[in-house]
Amino acid sequence: MLPFGRMSQTVKVLAFAGARDVVGAAELAFSLCEPCTSAQLLDAICEQFPGLSPHRRSLRLAVNGHYAEPETTVSPGDEVALIPPVAGG
């Protein structure tokens, strides 16, 4: 069972660009009862916001200001940035 859903502590999730449009806010609090991996957190975010699911493979997370690998630990109180792919010019 994943450590989501029970009201305990939260992580602050910052959403940028198209991800912000899908979640409907630039910032949200996501309930997290115990540490998990960034991959588990991203899966839970995509489950709560199904519009992100088609882009799951191209979304990146940054935890406390550092790009996260799928196995990076996320703990209650962390700040997580949800970063969609960016096109430059």
Image (cartoon, helix red, strand yellow):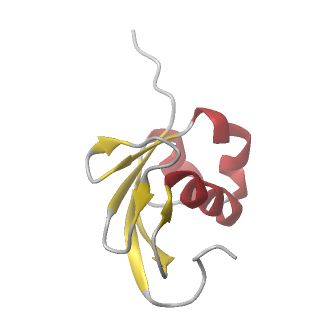
On the image, the x and y values in percent for residue 56 come to: 65, 42
Q: Is residue 49 left or right of residue 82?
A: right
Q: If the image is split into quadrants, where does the C terminus sit?
A: top left
User: In this rendering, is residue 24 above or below 57?
Assistant: below
Residue drawn at (59%, 52%) of the image: 22
Instruction: Give the vertical position of 21 relative to 87 (above or below).
Output: below
Q: Would you say 50 lies left or right of 26 here?
A: right
Indicate the position of residue 31 as horizontal and vertical percent values. Answer: 49, 78
Vertical arrangement, residue 61 with respect to residue 47, above or below: above
Q: Residue at x 37, y 74 (%)?
A: 76
Q: Residue furthest bottom?
A: 7
Residue at the extreme top of the image, as rendered: 89
Total marks shown come to 0
Q: State the residue at coordinates (48%, 77%).
A: 32
The image position of residue 35, as x and y in percent, is: 45, 70
Find residue 66 and report its horizontal and vertical position in percent.
Answer: 29, 42
Q: Residue at x 72, y 56 (%)?
A: 50
Assign the N terminus to one quadrant of the image. Answer: bottom right
Q: Is residue 44 left or right of residue 35?
A: right
Q: Nearer the viewer, residue 55 or 65?
A: 65
Task: Between residue 81 and residue 73, name the one nearer to us.
Answer: 73
Residue situated in front as seen by the camera: 60 or 33: 33
